[in-house]
Image: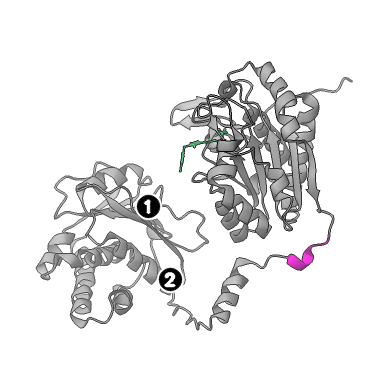
């Protein structure tokens, strides 16, 4: 019987590419003939074949590959320009079994992120870098990159790159391979089928290295950019062969994957923290652990978004909830968001208090929102999970939440603080109200934390104590 060939997308890709809610596509945003699409496919195939799709975390950089997270069926971080190696370091250290991939363009990797990549390579972090060298900044319209060839015309070198004023093309494989730590450094190309096959092998080897925790692998791939180079696809392929390869020779620059480097086995982050504290002679008193309380399922493991205007103590409110959660032995996180604040706008923080390890600190779909002013309510009720909980400051918010599925607690938070003689304690009224609604912790435990949070000023502590109790009691008496 004739062998049946099934043509399908590799499992490393998502079935549909959801660029925006409602905008589902079956193709990428890349221009015809672009190298990124080919490399994406090679990576997606390798992830499937090496059976690591489910534990891969990919950094989408700033550049043409910014939307990689729409395509790969993996975990993702959208990182700041050039910072993929720093984020990849954190991911691979925090989760040593992750297959961590830093995917970067030449502007991203060799210009703004030049030092980031060198330091990560020099530390021998256990991740792979796929580095697409297309000799320009593609996404922003074709400016000169560190890898631009001598004499090459770009929008910022209209007369051609002049090494006397613009420097020479930086050859990253040559630079990285001089460092001791990297285990595998290679340069391949995508300009014809034979070289695509070689790239395929390099991609697999690099991912296999990460799987075996061998350390830092660096795969530079010369990729076509017909739009940026203002050429047809076939001319772009030819340009790589005739112009780029003589400057960026292909081949393996370093391969010490067979060397026994077990002596540089990386300690796990937990051990590192303990070692550092020991070296600094820091005594850490373990948090006093309280037995966890019976909590209604809807309030267990809350993901909270607290929000209001600057000055309402939103950050302290979130911190108090996280700190008290820690006393009960929960995993907790607190993530402030200092956006470009505007008068009357929102300042907010995300807090999670959970039984299990917390993967992402941002409460993108909170189960509880605490809204201290109207813009906060209007903004965050939109992202509240179905059947979530809204605690809102009815002193300042004269409208009602529009979410009909939510459980709603209007609490005159600012008013209760004013009754105590100081509007500024409204944040602790909010904490008390949260404790009253969820019963996640005893409000008296927050009160014990106040000296730690506000220093030893007795009058301030006393006022905040009253505030916590006022919020708590209001909820217990009225709902
Ligand atoms: C901090 C910062 N600086 C500059 C930019 C503008 N910017 C976006 S993409 C890009 C260049 C990307 O080029 P490259 O890394 O070569 O990737 P390509 O688009 O060619 O794949 C620049 C400078 C930005 N987004 N952020």
Please identify the quadrant where the C terminus is shown.
Answer: bottom left
Which range is magenta? 260-264
Q: Is residue 409 left or right of residue 423?
A: right
Element at badge 2? helix
Question: In percent of the image, x 18 and y 75: which residue is there?
Answer: 463
Q: In this view of the protein, can residue 427 be seen by the observer? A: yes
Task: Mark 1 or mark 2: name the one nearer the start of the chain.
Answer: 2
Front residue (pair 177, 448): 177
Question: In percent of the image, x 62 and y 36: which residue is there?
Answer: 147
Front residue (pair 111, 169): 169
Please identify the quadrant where the N terminus is shown.
Answer: top right
Residue 367 badge: 1
Circles 1, 2 touching at the beta carbon (< 8 Å): no
Q: Nearer the viewer, mark 1 or mark 2?
A: 2
Distance CA(mark 1)–CA(mark 2): 19 Å
Q: Are there few (<14), some (14-19), or many (20+) residues within 10 Å of tag 1?
A: many
Asked if the stretch drawn in magenta spans residue 155, the answer is no
Q: Is residue 405 left or right of residue 256?
A: left
């Amino acid at each position: 019987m004739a062998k049946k060939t099934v043509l399908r997308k590799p499992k490393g890709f998502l079935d549909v590419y959801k660029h925006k809610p409602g905008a589902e596509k079956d193709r990428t945003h890349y221009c015809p003939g672009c190298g990124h699409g080919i490399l994406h496919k090679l990576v997606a195939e390798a992830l499937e074949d090496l059976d690591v799709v489910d534990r891969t975390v990919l950094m989408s950089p700033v550049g043409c590959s910014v939307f990689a997270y729409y395509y790969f069926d993996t975990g993702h971080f959208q990182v700041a320009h050039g910072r993929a190696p720093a984020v990849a370091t954190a991911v691979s250290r925090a989760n040593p079994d992750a297959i961590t991939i830093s995917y970067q363009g030449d502007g991203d990797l060799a210009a703004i992120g030049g030092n980031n990549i060198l330091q990560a390579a020099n530390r021998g972090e256990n991740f792979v870098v796929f580095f697409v060298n297309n000799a320009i900044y593609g996404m922003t319209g074709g400016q000169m990159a560190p890898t631009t060839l001598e004499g090459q015309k770009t929008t910022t070198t209209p007369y051609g790159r002049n090494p006397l004023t613009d420097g020479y093309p930086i050859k990253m494989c040559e630079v990285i391979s001089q460092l001791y730590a990297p285990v595998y450094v290679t340069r391949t190309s995508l300009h014809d089928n034979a070289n695509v096959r070689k790239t395929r092998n390099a991609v697999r080897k690099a991912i296999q290295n990460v799987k075996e925790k061998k350390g830092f692998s660096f795969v530079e791939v010369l990729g076509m950019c017909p739009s940026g180079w203002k050429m047809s696809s076939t001319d772009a392929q030819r340009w790589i062969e005739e112009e780029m390869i003589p400057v960026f020779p292909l081949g393996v620059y370093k391969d010490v994957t067979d060397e026994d480097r077990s002596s540089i086995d990386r300690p796990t982050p937990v051990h590192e923290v303990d070692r550092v504290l020991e070296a600094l002679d820091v005594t850490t008193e373990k948090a006093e652990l309280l037995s966890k309380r019976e909590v209604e399922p809807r309030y267990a493991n809350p993901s909270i978004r607290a929000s209001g205007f600057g000055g309402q103590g939103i950050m302290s409110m979130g911190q108090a909830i996280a700190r008290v959660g820690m006393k009960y032995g929960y995993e907790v996180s607190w993530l402030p968001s200092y956006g470009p604040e505007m008068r009357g706008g929102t300042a907010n923080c995300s807090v999670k208090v959970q039984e299990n390890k917390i993967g992402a600190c941002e409460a993108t779909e909170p189960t509880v929102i605490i809204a201290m002013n109207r813009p906060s309510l209007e903004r965050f009720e939109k992202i509240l999970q179905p059947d979530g909980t809204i605690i809102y400051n009815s002193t300042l918010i004269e409208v009602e939440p529009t979410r009909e599925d939510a459980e709603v607690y209007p609490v005159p938070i600012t008013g209760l603080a004013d009754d105590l003689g100081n509007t500024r304690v409204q944040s602790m009224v909010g904490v008390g109200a949260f404790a009253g609604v969820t019963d996640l912790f005893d409000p008296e435990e927050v009160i014990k934390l106040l000296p730690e949070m506000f220093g030893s000023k007795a009058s301030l502590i006393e006022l905040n104590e009253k505030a916590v109790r006022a919020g708590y009691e209001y909820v217990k008496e009225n709902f």
